[in-house]
Amino acid sequence: MTSSSNRPVRIGVQIAPQHSTYTEIRDTLTTLEELGVDVAFNWDHFYPLSGDPEGTHFEGWSMLAAWAEQTTTIEFGPLVTCNTYRNPDLLADMARTVDHISAKNGASGRLVFGIGSGWFERDYDEYGYEFGTVGQRLDALAEAMPRIESRWSKLTPPPTRKIPVLIGGGGEKKTLRIVAKHADIWHSFADTETLERKLGILRSHCDEIGRDFSEIEISTGASVRAGVGSSDTDALDAQHALGATLFTLGISGPGLDASQVSDLLAWRDAKNAA
């Protein structure tokens, strides 16, 4: 299965907002933009996901507003925001505002609106949200997406562009159907064999609703961990052959080591020149 699109390869870097000072996060973002990374991501959690569970951590959407003001060219967004942490209409308004903050020098905004159903139970328990079941959280995401899209059409001023919607997750019956209906980008952490199977399922969902499968950009994280920083780029090449074009490396404190980014960018440039 190959992509029918001619999208260029893009490189993303997710800066985990944990175990670092904000100065370190800010400086790392500057470095990524200077290197030519295409998209910078954070995440939408309230506690660290690895390391010391009581370690340093920052809230994601406040950070994205700061990133919008700090940067000038790089796209950015949450990978991913949790749908059930905020009223969908409010979340749409927040995203529209960050989109406008990032619009500079006559260009459109640069926000990528990453969203998912949520999964980290500690966030829910500590902040008083109802955790519910996986199915309930996915149903809530399906209900929220039309509200978010409708709110964007009602806001004054509206977003500066059609804000790209990235949906993360791999559930085959519900998540991928939501992707088919609403996503511009689908993000997966699947290995290559699993990715190929899920792409077939996503294509089937698109066919069922009359959506052009090639409109959805395929984004991946798993292949980056397997291929970056070595001469063996088989995993990257294999997922690119399946149609993936956005490859995201995750980095986390302490230290925020971005040394592997240059290798990824060199691989990107070679692919795009081919």
Image: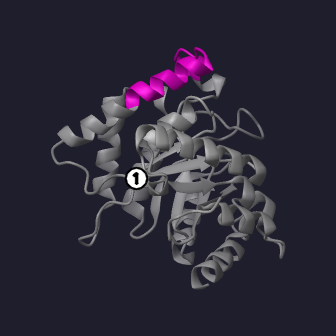
Residue drawn 55% across the image and 46% down it: 203
Depth check, front residue: 55 or 72: 72
Residue drawn 70% across the image and 46% down it: 197
From the top left corner, tell me how far across and down residue 26 is, in percent.
53, 60
Which residue lies most toward the left here? Answer: 156
Does residue 160 sit above or below 118 in this rendering? Answer: below
Does residue 166 sit above or below 106 in this rendering? Answer: above
Which residue lies most toward the bottom here? Answer: 273
**Quadrant of res 106:** bottom left
Depth check, front residue: 218 or 47: 218
Which quadrant would the C terminus be assigned to in this image? bottom right
Secondary element under disc 1, as helix, strand or loop, is loop
Q: Is residue 59 visible?
A: no
From the top left corner, tell me how far across and down residue 75 is, in percent.
45, 62
Q: Please tell me whether the stretch drawn in magenta is mainly helix, strand or loop.
A: helix
Which quadrant would the N terminus be assigned to in this image? bottom right
Describe the colour scheme in one phrase.
one colour
From the top left corner, tell me how far across and down residue 117 is, in percent.
54, 30
Q: Amino acid at mark 1?
A: Pro
Does residue 82 sit above or below 249 in this rendering? Answer: above
From the top left corner, tell me how far across and down residue 261 is, in percent.
67, 70
Please name the residue that numbered disc 1 is placed on.
164
Number of numbered tags placed on the structure image: 1
Q: Which residues are magenta?
A: 124-144
Q: Is residue 143 visible?
A: yes
Residue drawn 47% across the image and 37% down it: 208
Q: Residues within 10 Å of mark 1 (few under 14, many from 20)?
A: some
Residue drawn 39% across the image and 33% down it: 145
